[in-house]
């Protein structure tokens, strides 16, 4: 296992030093850019004042996005399972029909 290194990310005009495994560095930097973008968008709307409130609103928005995507993935997985079940039933039916025809 590789040792974490310190990565500095820039979010809302502040630098944050975060311990991160080298192989995760680009993911951390992407996440920081995404968060910075969300926070700046909320701040520029003028509806939320204060860095703490902006951070909470960004966290809520990102969490909502995450949960929405997770629901979509769960729905797609369930749909795929149903499709596979249907296909298996068709295969079983075709095999049973074929076995009955061969037995005659």
Image (cartoon, rainbow, N blue to C red):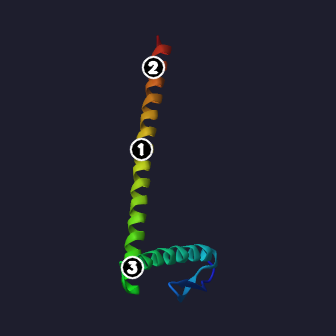
Precedes in sequence: disc 2 or disc 1: 1
Q: Give coordinates of residue 48: x percent, y percent.
A: 36, 80
Q: Give coordinates of residue 27: x percent, y percent.
A: 58, 72
Precedes in sequence: disc 1 or disc 3: 3
Precedes in sequence: disc 3 or disc 2: 3
Query: Residue 55 shows which numbered tag?
Result: none
Cβ atoms under marks 2 and 1 closer than 8 Å: no
Cβ atoms under marks 3 and 2 closer than 8 Å: no
**Would you place residue 35 above or below residue 7 in this image?**
above
Marks 2 and 1: which is nearer the front? 1
Residue depicted at x 56% and y 84%: 10
Q: Which residue is mark 3?
A: 46
**Residue farthest toward the top in the current orientation of the protein:** 104
Residue depicted at x 39% and y 79%: 46
Give the quadrant of residue 5: bottom right
* Mark 3 residue element: loop
Distance of label 3 from label 2 (alpha carbons) = 69 Å
Front residue (pair 68, 24): 68
Cβ atoms under marks 1 and 3 closer than 8 Å: no
Distance of label 2 from label 1 (alpha carbons) = 27 Å
* Mark 2 residue element: helix
Q: Which residue is mark 1?
A: 79
Q: Which residue is mark 2?
A: 97
């Amino acid at each position: 296992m590789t040792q974490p290194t310190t990565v500095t990310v820039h979010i809302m005009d502040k630098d944050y030093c975060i311990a991160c495994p080298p192989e995760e560095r680009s993911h951390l930097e992407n996440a920081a850019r995404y968060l910075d973008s969300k926070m700046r968008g909320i701040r520029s709307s003028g509806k939320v004042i204060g860095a703490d409130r902006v951070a909470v609103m960004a966290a809520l928005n990102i969490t909502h996005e995450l949960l929405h995507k997770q629901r979509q993935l769960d729905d797609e997985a369930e749909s795929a399972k149903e499709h596979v079940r249907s296909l298996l039933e068709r295969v079983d039916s075709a095999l049973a029909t074929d076995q009955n025809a061969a037995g005659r």
